[in-house]
Amino acid sequence: MIVEVFELLPGGRELDPDRLVARVHLPLVGPGRVEVVNPQRAGIVQELFENDFSSFVGEGDVVKEHTAWSPEAIHQILQEELYAYSLAGRVTSKS
């Protein structure tokens, strides 16, 4: 699967299709890789996806840890974490 990460349009939660930051390649097995398109903004994408594990604060300030590249970590990054940095991701390929 390939996820493209974009900057958000000003003032919203919609991605700006003209401001691609990175492509994240997610294989069915094993770790993925981040392909940098915009080096000025891609550092946070690399940090979110490429750590050995991901820690997220959930409801009630409970910290949840997920193994890097796990479906749970990917879901959390796409649904919550990217928006905190004015970024959004979309799946562009399931291959």
Image (cartoon, rainbow, N blue to C red):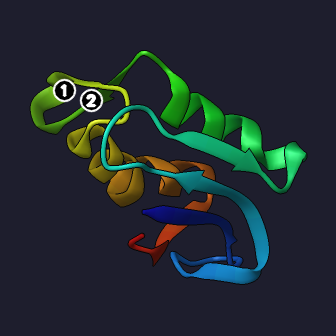
Left or right of residue 50: residue 18: right
Residue at point 51%, 63% (across, down):
3
Q: Quadrant of residue 39?
A: top right
Q: Closest to the observer: 76 or 10? A: 76
Q: Are marks 2 and 1 in contact (CB under 8 Å)?
A: yes
Q: Quadrant of residue 18?
A: bottom right
Q: Closest to the observer: 67 or 44? A: 67
Q: Quadrant of the C terminus?
A: bottom left
Amino acid bearing label 2: Val
Front: mark 2 or 1: 2
Left or right of residue 38: residue 22: left
| Residue 38 on image: x %, y % | 86, 54
Residue at point 42%, 63% (across, down):
1
> Considering only vertical position in the picture, is 94 above or below 37?
below
Residue located beneath label 1 in the image: 61
The CA distance from mark 2 to mark 1 is 5 Å
Residue at point 79%, 73% (across, down):
19
> Of the numbered discs in the image, which one, if any, rests on residue 38?
none
> Considering only vertical position in the picture, is 55 above or below 19?
above
Mark 2 closeness class: few <14, some 14–19, many ≥20 residues within 10 Å: few
| Residue 28 on image: x %, y % | 31, 49
| Residue 46 on image: x %, y % | 63, 35
Find numbered disc 2 in the image and state the secondary structure of the residue it sits on.
strand
Q: Closest to the observer: 82 or 46? A: 46
Find numbered disc 1 in the image and state the secondary structure of the residue it sits on.
helix
Residue at point 43%, 15% (across, down):
52
> Of the numbered discs in the image, which one, if any, rests on residue 57?
2
Amino acid bearing label 1: Asp
